Image (spheres, grey):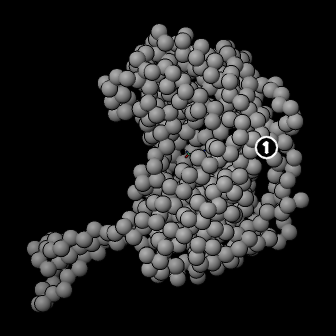
């Protein structure tokens, strides 16, 4: 059995015999590896090494730091297919989709290459007579990241390149379901010239998360995962005075107006609902067709959905792979049963799917419910599988009301050819990332990623300007070089 270790001292390391978690291939159900749960004493030794390494790294000239990321970028490009294959094998998403997600992560590395420009501060000359004022941004120290299973490369890449480029050290605890991709990225960053123990990877479960949350040596925590865990991370970090960004779950709506290009909208919806088997925080899980298009919309949607090819993740013919684990498959199936028992119309049923040779794989086919109501469980909760709910409404106002009333606020989109609807939607929808005739509006790395409401705790988005602000502390300096000595005064100083 393959034993997966940690990444410490610039290399893959084995963890002292300990408890471990078994990993099973999503496509076949076969057990293929054990991942360790890092014990407390080993965790603490790693932190001590990181403290020393970070004090040197933070003094390393900024152009040398950015130079490491230029090399890292070219190493990812050189090993692109190999990394995408690891993503496909451990997560189950198809190879072309794995490549797309790696590309989105690589864009953050591109952004980190620009760190000399991004860390330039403000400087005002003569804010008072012979008095200057300026801002500098300094690193936090040791930052931590805790990541979900659904983007084995992209989400870690949202975090550690920017944090490290800012002068921090970074300890990553990847999802215990997909530990291998981060280890490979860490090897490449080491090859690119990153000094030892500036990036470390510790594997494990909640017990390792708790070591991070309780460590007085860790200044900040970046979390991406489900909303209950995001809330827990946010509360614990706030109690321990750590800076925290905690991105949670989602229920993303697509609104299709009567004037939309129906073919374009349905094509966009198919990819957004069923790509990566619905295991994306930006997946569209609710579609709202308006008025007279409802019937043709459903016909077209069913026709196109029935042609989606499920299969083994690395088969170039496959468009959709399996879910991550047997337990998750059971959870998705139980939501489908709940939808039926609550009275939604099951138009396409993804249960009881049989794929020759993959009987033990975690496959669930694309599933569509029609006439879903807002009080149904399948509408209210995040399913995180290939299950699309269609809510039929009469007008724009009704749609805005339900989108804005939903607990989650990650992403949303509108399909329309009418600028007035589009602008009204953009301006008034209570959601963090908005698409106009764009199904999955994931911002580029030089903008920030993050939702609103129950999809984020702590208010700081990932990457872009918010990422730079998150991974640095601002210090504002007021300086004066006097020729003469002013008299003492107990009054509040003002600029003269
Ligand atoms: P998860 O919350 O179960 O796990 C995320 C991380 O938290 C993992 O590293 C895991 O080890 C750890 N963890 C799990 N339970 C914990 C607990 N009780 N206490 C402390 N740590 C714990 O999430 P997941 O199933 O890996 O990922 C899917 C979820 O992530 C979905 O809800 C999805 O919407 C969300 N997600 C959100 C975004 C976003 O940007 N908003 C992006 C990707 C995924």
Q: Is residue 134 left or right of residue 24?
A: left
Q: How many marks?
A: 1
Reading the image, the residue beneath label 1 is 26
Tell me: residue 3, above or below residue 47: above
**Residue, x 51% and y 46% (percent of image)?**
456
**Residue, x 64% and y 68% (percent of image)?**
188
Q: Position of residue 221 (x, y in %)?
A: 56, 60
Q: Position of residue 327 (x, y in %)?
A: 79, 39
Asked whether mark 1 lies closer than 8 Å to ligand 1, one says no
**Quarter of the image where one finds residue 132:** bottom left
Q: Is residue 357 visible?
A: yes
- Secondary structure beneath label 1: loop
Q: Nearer the viewer, residue 138 or 484?
A: 138
Q: Position of residue 320 (x, y in %)?
A: 69, 35
Q: Is residue 244 visible?
A: no
Tell me: residue 237, above or below residue 393: below
**Quarter of the image where one finds residue 193:** bottom right
* Quarter of the figure that contains the N terminus: bottom right
Q: Nearer the viewer, residue 199 or 339?
A: 199
Q: Residues within 10 Å of mark 1 (few under 14, many from 20)?
A: many
**Residue, x 56% and y 65% (percent of image)?**
74
Q: Is residue 418 left or right of residue 378?
A: left
Tell me: residue 319, above or below residue 149: above
* Quarter of the figure that contains the C terminus: bottom left
**Residue, x 51% and y 21% (percent of image)?**
263
Q: Is residue 477 left or right of residue 401?
A: left
């Amino acid at each position: 059995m393959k034993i997966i270790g940690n990444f410490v001292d610039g290399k893959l390391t084995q963890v002292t015999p300990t408890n471990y978690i078994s990993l099973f291939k999503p496509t076949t159900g076969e057990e293929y590896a054990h991942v360790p749960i890092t014990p407390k004493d080993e965790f603490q030794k790693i932190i001590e090494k990181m403290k020393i390494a970070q004090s040197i790294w933070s003094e390393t000239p900024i152009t040398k730091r950015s130079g490491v990321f230029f090399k890292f970028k070219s190493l990812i490009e050189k090993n692109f297919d190999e990394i995408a294959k690891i993503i496909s094998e451990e997560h189950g998403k198809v190879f072309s989709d794995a490549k797309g997600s790696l590309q989105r992560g690589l864009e953050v590395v591109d952004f980190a290459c620009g760190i000399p420009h991004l860390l330039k501060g403000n400087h005002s000359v003569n804010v008072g007579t012979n008095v200057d004022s300026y801002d500098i941004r300094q690193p936090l120290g040791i930052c931590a990241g805790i990541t979900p299973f659904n983007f084995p490369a992209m989400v870690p890449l949202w975090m550690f390149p920017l944090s490290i480029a800012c002068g921090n050290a970074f300890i990553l605890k990847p999802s215990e379901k997909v530990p291998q991709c981060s280890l490979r990225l860490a090897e490449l960053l080491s090859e690119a010239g990153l000094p030892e123990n500036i990036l470390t990877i510790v594997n494990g479960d909640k017990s390792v998360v708790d070591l991070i949350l309780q460590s007085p040596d860790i200044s900040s925590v970046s979390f991406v995962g489900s909303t209950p865990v995001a809330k827990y991370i946010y509360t614990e970090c706030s109690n321990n005075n750590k800076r925290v960004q905690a991105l949670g779950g989602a229920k993303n709506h697509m609104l299709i107006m009567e004037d939309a290009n129906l073919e374009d909208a349905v094509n966009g919806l198919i990819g957004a609902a069923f790509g990566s088997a619905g295991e994306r925080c930006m997946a569209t899980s609710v579609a709202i067709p308006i008025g007279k298009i409802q019937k043709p919309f459903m016909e077209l949607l069913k026709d196109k959905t029935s042609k989606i090819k499920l299969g083994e993740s690395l088969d170039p013919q496959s468009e959709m792979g399996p879910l991550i684990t047997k337990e998750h498959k059971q959870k998705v199936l139980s939501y489908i049963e709940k939808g039926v028992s609550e009275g939604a119309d099951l138009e396409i049923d993804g249960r009881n799917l049989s794929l020759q040779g993959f009987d033990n794989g975690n496959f669930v086919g694309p599933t569509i419910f029609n006439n879903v109501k807002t009080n149904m469980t399948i509408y209210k909760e995040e399913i995180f599988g290939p299950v699309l709910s269609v809510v039929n409404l009469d007008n724009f106002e009704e749609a805005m009301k339900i989108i804005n009333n939903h607990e989650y606020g990650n992403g949303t989109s509108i399909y329309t050819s009418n600028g007035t609807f589009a602008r009204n939607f953009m301006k008034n929808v209570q959601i963090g990332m908005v698409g106009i005739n764009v199904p999955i509006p994931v911002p580029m790395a030089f903008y920030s990623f993050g939702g609103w409401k129950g999809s984020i705790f702590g208010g700081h988005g990932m990457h872009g300007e918010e990422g730079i602000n998150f991974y640095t502390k601002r210090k504002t300096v007021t300086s004066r070089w006097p020729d003469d000595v002013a008299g003492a005064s107990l009054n509040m100083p003002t600029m003269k």
